[in-house]
Amino acid sequence: MSNQATDWRIGVDTGGTFTDIVLTGGDGDIRVAKVPSTPENPARALVTGAESILASAGLGHEELRAICHGTTVATNALLQGQIDDLALVVTKGFRHVLEIARQSVPEGYGNSYFWVKPDRIVPVHRVFEVDERLDFTGNVIRELDEDGVRNVARRLKKRGLSAVGVCLIHSYANADHEQRVRGILESEYPELTVSISSDVWPEYREYERAVTTLVDAFVKPHMRRYLGDISALLPSTLSQMPFLVMQSSGGVLSSEQVAHKPIATALSGPAAGVVGASAMARLAGRENIITLDAGGTSTDICLVQAGTPQVTTSASIGPFPVRLPMIDIRTVGTGGGSIAWIGAEGQLRVGPKSAGAEPGPMCYPNGGDAPTITDANAVLGRIPAQLIGGAIALDVGRARAGLAELGKQLGGDMGPERLAAGIIEIANWNQANLIRQMTIEQGIDPRQFALLSFGGSGPAQSPAVMELLGLDACLVPPNPGNLSALGLLMVDYRSDHVFTQIVSGDQLSPGMAAGIYSDLERDAAETLARDGVAAGDIMVLRQADVRYSGQSMEVRVNLPGGAITEAALAAMVENFHAAHERTFGYCYRGTQEIEIVNFCASGLGKVQKPELPAADVTEQPFPDAAEMRQVYFGEDWIDTPIYDRASLEGGMTGTGPMVIQEFGSTTVVFPGQSVSVDGYQILIIGRAP
């Protein structure tokens, strides 16, 4: 690898089991590494990995231009932390906003009689009222009682509550009262962490806005502590350079700005994977894909249509609904470390509990005491006896003994191989069923999509998932175990802004829309400028949340760029009709009035992305394998060719069974399947003719 490139950048994706690192240069050179995650302090693995990959490339700190990071610190803090020091401040008369919540019942419950509301993120005795009131346009009905706010601050301090979210009614239309509340709280109680809804997400729907603000307030100290740990551990020459953090919306911002709104990073690692997968799909000539990112603890699924990942503003982190633009990623608790166990009914189950990085699967050194998906693949011979370039030597005998013991508990005469195959089949169906929910149950035909598989454990099983769903192809990019880290280096700066104002379609004029978007675009440009993005590198995406009059939910659509004219507004309305019909199967074009509810603008700042050159392709069959290994398929052991992926060339074609091994992942091509290698070294697996 040459070290003459001028734009070396590192992407670091922290997962539950491994931390993945990618180093890229301006000339397209790519180097990858993996280190075990350090759950007790995730910053240690990040710094260790960054230092080691620079050393392996022979690069000095001064040759690096930026570090881009995807993290689940915010999500993990929320899902695993004890939320017992968090409070909420609301407008007088709205103390029960969290108790009332929404009347909707989650899917899977016949009606509300069988559903018990989960515990609120903040119980009612930690909700404090202040006297003030705005109307929906932002006009003041009742001035803020500042003495009352001071009294709330003293009560918070007396009770030892360390974080608070402030969500005043209609503050999305006028942030003045919330900003004054924050100033008083911080003045009276400097140690208090404060988030205000008009900063976090100034949009109507006070319940979701309140929960989103509370989540931000809770994770803010965790994120600041984590970023502080990274800064302290990084050598001074590295800590001075740009440190960018991936947001759930599919863009990056500096760590300094993310620390002020950490909720934006809730799904940052998986979002980077989708961005990287979309880029790989474009190289392979595919616009419609289903991304499948299977790591050590879970599998993340996303639909990409016409080259664009689906984005939602109505997502959940665990039981908590949040309102922020996020790539629409769904998760199932099936990963390489997912534990096989016996349910109360005596049936075999797989996941969601995971062995994680510590202790890890049974076959790992110092591994756990329960068999996992990785143990099953090891016993079946589908993964090598040493992982991560020999860094992890597997004890297949111990995994086999664990499966034998689990088989005894199940009863009957089931050998380790059949039980291992059953574990893999259950895991495959867990993934396939989630994809069916996201496609068939939404009126989308999955057969029009290809599966793009990545993550450390994904490619070993995804070709079988492809068969279960009837898809025409499964794509496996190079270095699939590090694709999320590579995706971090393929994203632009992004800053999202929203303004709520309900306007009927016949009342919206070009002048009104231009005035609103001008303010939003200015805010977006100022945010990116604080990260050093030049004005010439900034572009703005205009969107709007639109609904039919009388509806309670909206559809987000694009507004054409350039001058806002009557024709541009008409195009936006037509985009809404088309999107509504595509999503719900019908529309009321020309018969029902529409309303614009939210005006949205996303500022995008260009960054230099790695260019992946295509190699010349010569059609040829796979060569004879240098190694053969007994691998279990169906109910038989088959002598199977084993290939080193680095030895494969563009244009090679072959048929299964075969196993293709590389650093960080293994791809299994099953009997009856074909495989080809394209010019970008992407494996394309399909059904054999």
Image (tube, rainbow, N blue to C red):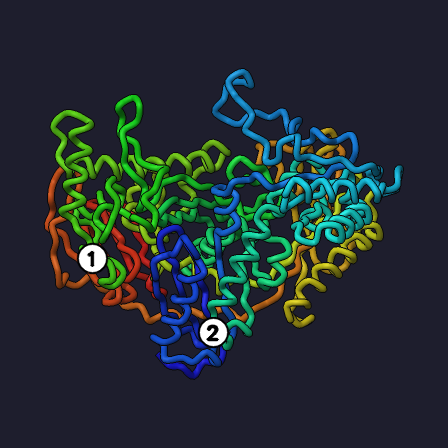
Which image quadrant is residue 245 in? Answer: bottom right
Residue projecting furthest to the front: 158
- Observer-nearest of 42 and 193: 193
Q: Is residue 244 visible?
A: yes
Residue 472 percent location from the top left of the image: 35, 45
| Tag 1 near tag 2, CB within 8 Å | no
> With respect to residue 461, does 477 lie above or below?
below
Q: Work out whether mark 1 precedes mark 2 in sequence or the reverse, and give the earlier one.
A: 2
Q: Is residue 91 left or right of residue 114?
A: right
- The image shows residue 386 at horizontal and vertical percentages of 20, 58
User: Which residue matches tag 2?
Assistant: 235
What residue did someone put label 1 on? 393
Q: Position of residue 125 (x, y in %)?
A: 66, 31
Does 643 sit above or below residue 400?
below
Q: Secondary structure at mark 2?
A: loop
Q: Residues within 10 Å of mark 2 (few under 14, many from 20)?
A: few
Residue for point 25% across, 48% down = 367
**Res. 113 image quadrant:** top right
Which residue occupies the foreground of this view, 547 or 605?
Answer: 605
Which residue extends farthest top?
113
Q: Badge 1: few (under 14), some or many (20 or more) residues near its Cα, within 10 Å? A: some
Disc sitting over residue 586 in the figure: none
- Quadrant including the N terminus: bottom left
* Numbered disc in front, either 1 or 2: 2
Q: Residue at x 54, y 57 (%)?
A: 225
Assign a secondary structure to mark 1: strand
Say what amino acid the circle numbered 1 marks.
Ala
Residue at the (26%, 66%) spot, across then down: 646
Question: Considering depth in this image, is 160 or 199 the residue closer to the camera?
Answer: 160
